């Protein structure tokens, strides 16, 4: 750190002050409310599937169904974020997504809910997420100054992980009183504030809102080419993909771990998700004290290695009391790794390529989790949840060591050019 660099306490104070700006503060509050509903459903949905007789393989399939559209459509979403009307993209696709928890409420109330219906609605959520998330991820750079971007992304991670604590806590109360239907209803209601805020906070596009199909295809290919041509961006994407593929399935199979390895119930599961979010919140708060000019690569590599190591300890842990501690450490490490990677990507890429870069980041993170969940579901079915997670942990450590070595040695030149 140079003599002129801000001290950690100064960087932290500056970051927190960003919450009190009108546009970013309202955006964070609306995002928090939306994520509360999302995490309440993340507790209710796998437990609903288990109560319907679903196997661990079907849980993996449900996670894959929600994440698989990322591979096909996130790059299209990135092109829409850069060249389309982001207000229309977010409002349209998030409104469609809101209908999915409403449908689950209706199916449960009429007593006709089946496992395949839950998985089918997960596909719809995955499609709309893939098309709208790049536009959502580029909101922060639009409403803050460039030197505030690291703080804005850290604050965004903070509210996301706070929702990971509060959402499961609400889910525990709702599951005990109203059942899964209460969690799905809460999620449906949580969409409205975010859609309204996105319409208010984003500037309207004056040019044609949606590019022609040929222009979208060219934009996708050009974006992939430019991101891949930058060694540091390429290495960042590989790091995110490797950790998401191998460590991400921990949360997908947490209900199986709690039920089968520790004979726990939905209360234990919601507690585990909550403490995972608490760890993520602590990680995001820690990032608020990191000076804006600090190289995020070292943070990401170290946190990714820690995440893989903790996963290994989760796999061999024989004590229920130790599981919350390990999951808190896992959430802490994952948040620092992913947020540092996202900050590095958005700070390094040019404004004209930011939507593409974010879409590739989302593709690597969420696509990695979807494929990892499917593969891990097969291995859990074959060898049990503990052995499956232990193999994932060992492979993750190898991948982090290999990719991290290349990333830290990659040439500084190579920020992707504007398009």
Image: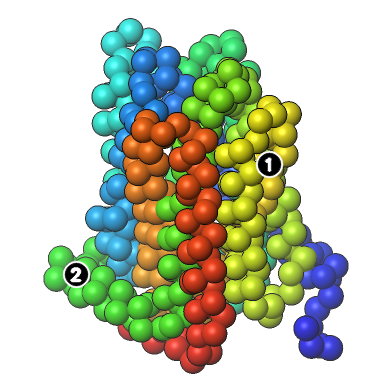
Looking at the rendered structure, the secondary structure element under dot 1 is: helix
Applied colour scheme: rainbow
Q: Name the foreground residue: 32 vs 288.
A: 288
Q: Position of residue 372 (x, y in %)?
A: 39, 47
Disc number at residue 217? 2
Q: Position of residue 82 (x, y in %)?
A: 35, 70
Q: From this view, report whether residue 76 is shown above or below residue 326.
A: below
Disc number at residue 374? none
Whether residue 305 appears in this view of the structure is: yes
Is the Cβ of the residue at disc 2 closer than 8 Å to that at disc 1?
no
Give the side of residue 419 with respect to residue 259, left or right: left
Whether residue 163 appears in this view of the structure is: no
Q: Name the foreground residue: 86 vs 402.
A: 402
Q: Name the foreground residue: 43 vs 292.
A: 43
Q: Quadrant of the C terminus?
A: bottom left
User: Which of pointers 2 and 1 lies earlier in the amino acid sequence?
Assistant: 2
Question: What crowding class fits label 2: few (fewer than 14 Cα within 10 Å), some (14-19), or many (20 or more)?
Answer: some
Q: From this view, report whether residue 224 is shown above or below residue 37.
A: below
Residue at horizontal 58%, vertical 46%?
311
Image label count? 2
Give the side of residue 183 with respect to residue 378, left or right: right
Q: Quadrant of the N terminus?
A: bottom right
Q: CA distance from mark 2 to mark 1?
A: 44 Å
Give the side of residue 4 with respect to residue 34, left or right: right
Q: Which residue is mark 1?
A: 326
Residue at horizontal 81%, vertical 64%?
13
Which quadrant of the structure image shows residue 73? bottom left
Residue at horizontal 33%, vertical 7%?
111
Looking at the rendered structure, the secondary structure element under dot 2 is: helix
Question: What crowding class fits label 1: few (fewer than 14 Cα within 10 Å), some (14-19), or many (20 or more)?
Answer: many
Q: Position of residue 351 (x, y in %)?
A: 45, 78
Q: Position of residue 290 (x, y in %)?
A: 74, 69
């Amino acid at each position: 750190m140079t003599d002129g660099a801000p001290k950690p306490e100064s960087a932290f104070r500056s970051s927190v002050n960003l919450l009190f700006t009108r546009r970013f503060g309202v955006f964070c509050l609306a995002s928090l409310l939306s994520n509360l509903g999302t995490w309440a459903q993340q507790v209710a949905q796998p437990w609903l599937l288990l109560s319907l007789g679903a196997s661990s393989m079907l849980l993996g399939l449900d996670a894959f169904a929600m994440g698989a559209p990322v591979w096909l459509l996130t790059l299209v979403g990135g092109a829409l974020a850069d060249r389309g009307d982001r207000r229309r993209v977010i409002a349209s696709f998030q409104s469609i997504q809101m209908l999915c928890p409403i449908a689950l409420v209706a199916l449960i109330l009429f007593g006709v809910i089946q496992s395949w219906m839950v998985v089918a609605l997960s596909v719809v959520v995955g499609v709309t997420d893939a098309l709208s998330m790049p536009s959502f991820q580029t909101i922060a750079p639009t409403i803050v100054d460039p030197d505030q971007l690291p703080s804005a992304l850290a604050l965004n991670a903070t509210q996301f992980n706070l929702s990971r604590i509060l959402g499961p806590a609400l889910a525990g109360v709702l599951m005990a009183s109203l059942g899964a239907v209460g969690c799905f209803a809460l999620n449906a209601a949580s969409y409205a504030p975010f859609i309204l805020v996105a319409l208010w906070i984003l500037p309207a596009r004056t040019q044609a809102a949606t590019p022609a199909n040929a222009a979208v295809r060219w934009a996708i290919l050009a974006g992939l080419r430019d991101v891949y041509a930058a060694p540091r961006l390429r290495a960042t994407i590989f790091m995110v993909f490797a950790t998401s593929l191998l460590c991400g399935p921990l949360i997908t199979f947490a209900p199986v771990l709690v039920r089968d390895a520790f004979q726990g119930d939905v209360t234990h599961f919601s507690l585990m998700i909550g403490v995972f979010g608490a760890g993520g919140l602590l990680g995001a708060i820690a990032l608020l004290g990191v000076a804006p000019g600090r190289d995020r690569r070292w943070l990401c590599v170290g946190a990714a290695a820690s995440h893989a190591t903790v996963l290994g300890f989760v796999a061999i842990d024989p004590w229920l009391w130790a599981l919350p501690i390990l999951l808190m450490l896992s959430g802490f490490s994952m948040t620092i790794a992913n947020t540092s990677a996202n900050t590095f990507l958005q700070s390094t890429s040019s404004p004209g390529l930011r939507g593409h870069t974010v879409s590739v980041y989302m593709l690597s993170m969420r696509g990695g989790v979807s494929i990892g969940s499917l593969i891990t579901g097969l291995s859990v079915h074959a060898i049990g949840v503990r052995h499956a997670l232990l193999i994932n942990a060992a492979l993750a450590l190898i991948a982090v060591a290999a990719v991290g070595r290349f990333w830290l040695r990659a040439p500084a030149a190579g920020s992707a050019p504007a398009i």
